[in-house]
Amino acid sequence: MADPPASTCAGHELSTPRIRTTRRVRAIVVLVVVTAIWGVTFVQVKGAVALYPLFAFLALRFAIASCTLAPPGLRRMHTLGARGIRAGALAGSLTAAGYLLQTAGLQRTSISSAGFITGLYVVLTPLIVLALFRVRSSGLTWTGVGFATAGLALLAGVHAGSVVGDLLVLAGAVVYSLQIVLMERYAPRYDAIAFTLIEMVTAFSSLALLAAALGELRMPHGWTVWSALVVTGVFASALGYLAQAWAQRRTTATQTALVFTVEPVWTAFFGFTLAGDRLGAAAWLGCILIMAGISISEPAAVGMLVRMVRRPRVA
C-alpha cells in the first residue's frame, strides 16, 4: 500500500493540538459558567442560612444533589469498580472537609480574610501538583496566578483576622486544592455521572452526621430556604461538580483553580446587581486583575466567551 500524501500526515499532526486546544477552551468556558452559578447562589444561601442551621443546610443541599444524579448515576455505577467508588468517596470526603474547615474558620476570623485565604488555592494547586506529580506550570500560568492572587487580595480587602481562624480557612483551601488536583487524575478514568454521584453521597453523609451531632437536623420551612436548597442542590452541586468532572478531563488542575478565582468576581457582581452591595475602587480593580490573570493564562478561552456574548440571537 502506498504511503499517504505528506500533506495529509502533516495536516493530521497539526489538527491534533488544535483539537486539544479547542476542547480545553470549551472546558474552561464551562467552568466559568459554573463559577457564575456559584456566585449567584451566594445571595440565596446568605438569606437561607440566616433562617436555617448551616451544616443542616449543607447536608440537605448534597442530599438533593445525590437524588438529582441518582437516576442516571445508579445505572452507571458498575463502570466504576471498587477503585472508582473509593476515589469518588475520597473526593466527596475532601469536599465535605473543605466546607467544614472553611466554616469553622469563618466563625473565628473576618469574612474578607477568609475570602482571600480560601482563594489561595489558585497558588496552592500548582504547588501540590508539583509536589505530588512533579508537573511544572508554565511561566504564563504563574503570571496569571500572580494577577489573580493580587486581585483576590484587593477584592477581599484582607483585613486582619484571628490566627486560629485563618489557619482553619487555610487548611480548607489546601483541601480544596487537593480535591482539584485529584480530580485531574480521576476525571479521565471514571464515568463522570457515577463518580459525581458517589462524591455527592459521601459529602451528604459526612455533613449529615455532623449536623445530627450538633442537633441541627430538622425540617426546613419557607420559600427562602427551600428555593436556596433546590438551586444549590441541583445546579451548584449536582450539575456544578458534574461539570467539574467533565471539564477536568480536558484541563489541568492549575487551569481549573485559576478559573475558579472568577467565583468571587461573580459574587461581587451579583451582590451589586441583586442585593444592592456597593464595591469600592480597590474591589473593582481586584475583579479586573482576576480577569487579567485568566486572560494572560488562557486568552483563547476569553475570546470564546466574548464571542458567545456578542453572538446575535436568532429571533
Image (spheres, rainbow, N blue to C red):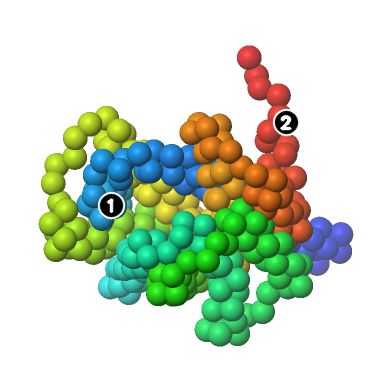
Determine which of the numbered discs, if any, sits on residue 27 in the image.
none
- Under mark 2, the amino acid is Arg
Q: Are marks 1 and 2 in contact (CB under 8 Å)?
A: no
Q: Quadrant of the N terminus?
A: bottom right
Determine whether, in the image, residue 173 is placed left or right of residue 17: left
x, y (%) of residue 186? Answer: 44, 69
Determine whether, in the image, residue 58 is placed left or right of residue 312: left
Extreme top residue here?
315
Question: Is residue 208 shown to the viewer in this render?
Answer: yes
Look at 20% across and 63% down and name the residue there: 210
Look at 70% across and 46% down and name the residue there: 281
Q: Nearer the viewer, residue 241 or 106?
A: 106
Residue at disc 2, secondary structure: helix
Report, in whole angstroms, how far the alpha carbon at label 1 lies from the one at label 2: 40 Å
Q: Within 10 Å of the Cα at label 1, are there few (<14), some (14-19), or many (20+) other Cα atoms?
A: some
Q: Quadrant of the C terminus?
A: top right
Q: Which residue is mark 2?
A: 310
x, y (%) of residue 216? Answer: 16, 53
Q: Which residue is mark 1?
A: 54
Look at 33% across and 71% down and name the residue there: 90
Q: Nearer the viewer, residue 137 or 313?
A: 137
- Under mark 1, the amino acid is Leu
